Image (tube, coloured by chain):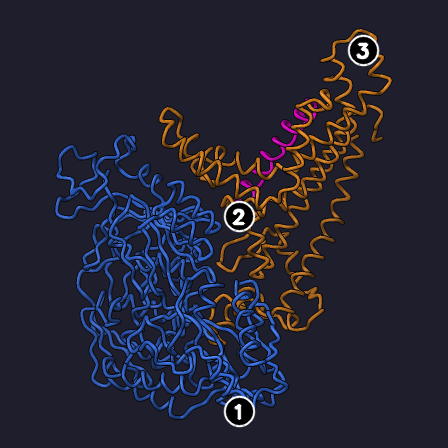
Chain colours: A orange, B blue
Amino acid sequence: MGRYVARRLLQFIPTLIFTLLLLHYLMTLSLQISGNPVASLFGDRRPPQEIIDTISAQFGLNDACLDQTGNPCLGIFWDRVTGYATGDLGFSFTGRAVTDLLSERLPLTLRLALIAIAFQIVVGIVIGVIAGIRKDKLVDNAVRMSTVLLIAVPVFVFGVLVSLLVGIYVGNWVRGEWDWAPEWVREGLFAPIYRAEHMWASLIVPGFVLGAFSLAAVARLTRSSLIENLRADYVRTARAKGLTSRRVVGVHTLRNSLIPVVTYVGVSFGGLMGGAVVTEGIFSIPGVGNLVFVAVRTGEAPIVIVVVTLLVLVFLIVNLIVDIFYAVLDPRIRYD
Amino acid sequence: MRRTTPKLLAAGVASIALLLSACGGDDGDDESSTDESTEGSDTDETEGTEDEATEGGGIYSVYSAEPTLFAPLGNCYESVCSAIANIVYTGLTDADPETGELILTGAESIETDDSQNFTITLKEGQTFHDGTPVTAASYINTWTYNAAFGVGTGFWWGKVLGYADIAGTEDPAAVLEGLQEVDELTFTVALDSPYSQFPLTLAYTPAVAPMADACLADLEACNEQPIGNGPYQFSEAWAHDQSITLAKNEAYNLDNVGNADGILFKIYESPSAGLRDYQAGGVDIMSPQPDELPTAEAAAGDKILRGPSSAYTFVGLPVYAPGLDDVDVRRALSMAIDRQAIIDNVLSGVGTPADDSISPAVPGYEAGSCEYCTYDPEAAKALYDQSGGLPDDTLELFFNADAGHEAWMEAVANQWFNNLGIEVKQSPVEWADHLDKIGVAEEDPENAADNPDTIKGAFRLGWLMDYPSPENYLRPLYDEGRYVAWINEGFSAKLQEGDALAPEEAVAVYREAADIVLDEMPFIPISYGESIRIWSDNVTNVNYDITKANPVFEEIEVVQQ
C-alpha cells in the first residue's frame, strides 16, 4: 500500500510539469493572438504608449517573443517555474500577489466543494438506498423523477432559481416572521448570496446547488447498483441465514454497491471545480472559480496557470484517495 | 479615463449596516416611524447622536465590485475605484453637476492671466487622515510621482512644462519643471501652451488628489488602507473581495461634510448577485444592469433614479477607406440607423439616442445639433445612391467581443442592409486586439490608406469623460487624426482657439468645433449612457452627480428607525 501511494505521488510530478507547460503555452498563445492585455486595462481610451510600455514591463509582457505567434516562449516559462520554486507565484494586474489571492480564495472554494461533496455523498446515497430497496414504489418514482429534473436543469438556471426562492421569497418571509431564529439562520442560511460574516451558514445553499447534479447522479447510481446486488447469490445466502434486512442492505449489499459510486464521486470532483465557476458567480462567493474566470478574460496568465494547476493537483489527490478507498470497500482489491 | 466594462458602481446594504452601526439593538420591532422623523432627541438610541445640528448618523451600504487599487492613487481610474476615491480624497476643483461650472473644493483660488501660468492657493487647515497637513508640496510630490513612474493617469500632466523630461523615468528624485512651490499653501503650474480647461481637468480626483507623505513612502500599505484627505476615511483595512468600510472624517473642514457616520461598500462578484441581495435587504444602494431593469424597478418602486451618464458610444468611419472617404456615404450611414429602436429593443430601453458629438454631461451640448443623426431611411438611401457608394456595397464592422455589443452591432448591420442595401460583415475581436487595430491609422494618418495594417471598415468605440468640458470629448476622440485619420484644419484651429480663452468663452468655440465633426461625420454618434441607482428604505436624499456618474455619497442620509 505504502509503495503504491509513493508511486502514485511520484507520477504527480510529470503530470504537473506537463500541465504547467500546456497552460503556459495556451496562455502565451492567447496573448500572442489577442494582443497586449495591458491596453484593455484602460477601457475605451488608448493610453499613451509610454504608459502601456511601463506597465507591460512591470508584468513581463514586453518580451519580444510575445509578438511571435506560435513561439512557446520557453524563456518566460523558465522564469515562471524558477519563480514558483522561490515561492513567487506572480502578480495580478491590480498588483496583488497571486499567493495572497490564493490564500484568501482557495479555502472558500474548498469549503464550497466540501459541502457539495457532503451533500452528494450523504443525501445522494441515502435517497439512492431508499429508492433501491423500495423499487417501483412511490418513493422510488419520486426519487427518479426529481433526480432526472436535477440532472436536466443546467446549474446556472438552477442556482439562480434556488437563490431567488430560498434567499428572497422564503428568506424575506423568514426574516420578517422568525424573530426567534438565530442570526445565522435569518441572515446566513436564508441569504440569497454568500455572506462573509456567516460563512458556513451562507455556503450551505450554494454547496447544495453545486452538488445537486452529482447528487442526483450518485442517487441513481446507488439505486441501480443496489438493485443489481440485491439479486446476487450472497444476498440470498445472507437472508437465508436469517440476517435482518437492515444488516443485509446496510452492511453487505451497500458496501459492494458503492464501488461505482465512489468512482463517480472522484471523477465528478473535476466537474465540481468547473461548476464552482458558475456557482461562485451566482452566489457572489469570492473563490478561485470566479478568479480564474475573470483572469482568463483579462489575460492574467500568472493567475490562470497557478490556479488551474492547483485544481489539477487537488483533482489528482482526490482520485488517489478514491483509488485507496476501493481497497477499503472491496477486500479483493489489493495494491501491492 | 475610467474603465467602462465594469459599469456598476456602488450600492449599499441595509440590514448589515444596521447591525454594524452603533445602535445595535434589535431592529424591526416597529415599522412606524419610517418618515424622516427629525427625531427630536427623545428616546435616542445609544451613542448615535454627536450634535443636534446635523441630523446625520448611521451607516449605509453600497454595492460595489472589487476596485483595482488605491495607491498610487493615479492608478485608481476605473469607475469602481474612483467612486470610492472621490469621497476618500478631495482634490482642487469640482464641477457643478447641473451647469458644469467650476467649483473650488480644496483650492482657495486658481488664478491665471494667460491660461498658461496658473497660481493655485489651497484652503487652510486641510489635513490628511493621519493628521498631517495638506500642503502645496503634497500636490507637487504626488503629481511628479505620477508623471515619473508611468502611473495610469500620469499623462494628466502631459501639458505641464518639463513633463517629457521625466515621464516614465522612474526616478524618485525627478523634478517636474512646471510645478513650483511658492509657500506652504501656494504653488504655480506652468504649461507648455495656453490651455483654458486646465482648472477643469483638476476636477478629476484620482489623477489630482494629493497623497500623504506616509503614503508615498509606503505605497503597499497605503493601498490596503489609503490615507486620504476627503470627507470619509478608511476606518479599517480593505477587506479584499468583501468590503471597504469608511467612517466619517471628523476633522474635515470643507463644505461637503458627510451626513452618514459611515459607508460600507460591499463587494460583489456580479451585479445580479448584488440585485438579489438588495431584494433581500442586504444592500442599501444598488446599480442594476440594464437587462435586469424590470426586476430592479419592481423591487425598488419609486426609489429609483435614472440619470444621464457621460458615456458616449459611437461608430468610427475610417475616412481613408475606399467608399468611406465620401462624406455622403458617411452621412447616409448615420441617417440609416434608427437609434431609438436599437435602444428600446436591444438595450432594454437604457440610454438615449446621441444627437451631438459631445455628451449632455458637458456644457456646450445642444440637443438635436446633429443633422444627420435623425433616422430617415429614404433620405439616407437617396444620398447613398447619388454618392459613389461603398465598393461592392459591402462594409466590415469591427467591435470587441464579449462585452455585450454583439446584439446592437447586429441591429446596426441589419438596418444598414435593410435601408441602404449594404452587406455588412461583422468582425468581433478581442478587446486588446480591437484597440490595437483601430490605433494603427492615427500613427501615420497621411498614409493610412496604403497601410495594410489599418482597418478598412467601421468600428465601435465608447468614451467616458474625465472632466466636464466639451474639450474632453473633442480632443481625445477627434483631433489629430485620432482613430480614423480624419484631419481637419478648421477643427484643430477651433480647439486651439478655445484653449486660449477663458473657460466660459471657450465653450462657444468648442461648440463650433463639435459642429464641424457633425458635418463631416467621421464618427457616427450612436447613444448616450444612462446610470441607474435604486435604494432601500434605509436611506434618503439620494441625488445624482452627473460628472461623477454616481450618487452624491456625502449627502445621503440614513433613515433612523
Instruction: Tell me the subunit letter for badge 2.
Output: A
Q: Residues within 10 Å of mark 2 (few under 14, many from 20)?
A: many
**Tags 3 and 1 touching, CB below 8 Å:** no
**Residue B93 visible at all:** no
Instruction: Tell me the subunit letter for badge 1.
Output: B
Residue type pointed to by label 2: Gly
| Nearer the camera: disc 1 or disc 2 | 1
> Relative to the observer, which residue lies in front, A295 or A68?
A295
Residue type pointed to by label 1: Ser
Give the main secondary structure of the magenta stretch: helix
Disc 1 target residue: B387
| Nearer the camera: disc 3 or disc 2 | 3
Q: Is residue A245 above or below residue B81?
A: above
Residue type pointed to by label 3: Arg
Quadrant position of the C terminus of chain A in the picture: top right
Disc 3 target residue: A239
Name the element at disc 2. helix
Answer with left or right where residue A204 lies relative to residue A306.
Answer: left
Q: Residues within 10 Å of mark 3 (few under 14, many from 20)?
A: some
Res. A281 mark? 2
